[in-house]
Image (cartoon, helix red, strand yellow):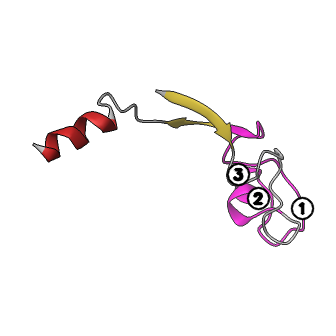
Amino acid sequence: MRKLVECEHCHGRKVCTISGGRSCRECLAAAGKSLREFATVRCSYCGGRGKVWVEVEEDEEAPEASESDDEG
């Protein structure tokens, strides 16, 4: 199952300001900017959306059922 969660890189702000108020190297490169440029660009991890899809595993088995098997 997939779940929509807040981007861990930009914390949902849609722009990357992770490197002291400016964008990181990955986001600058993705935007076509120079790595030495002091710029704020859209987050390349979420594409400027502020949210990303992540895979979440569903536990088909209840945790209580596995505990009862160990007792017997």
Are the residues flagged by discs 2 and 1 in contact, CB closer than 8 Å?
yes
SS state under label 2: helix
Of residues 9 and 3, which is closer to you in this image?
3
Residue lying at the far front in this picture: please name it. 72
Please tell me the numbered disc located at residue 39. Answer: 1
* Category of crowding for the residue at label 1, using alpha-carbon neighbours closer than 10 angstroms: few (below 14), some (14–19), many (at least 20): some
Q: Quadrant of residue 14?
A: top right
> Quadrant where the C terminus lies?
top left
SS state under label 3: helix
Region in magenta? 23-51
Q: Check disc 3 and report the residue beneath it.
A: 30
Distance between the alpha carbons at the discs numbered 2 and 3:
5 Å
Magenta stretch mostly in which secondary structure? loop
Q: Amino acid at mark 3?
A: Ala
Please tell me the numbered disc located at residue 55. Answer: none
Please tell me the numbered disc located at residue 28. Answer: 2
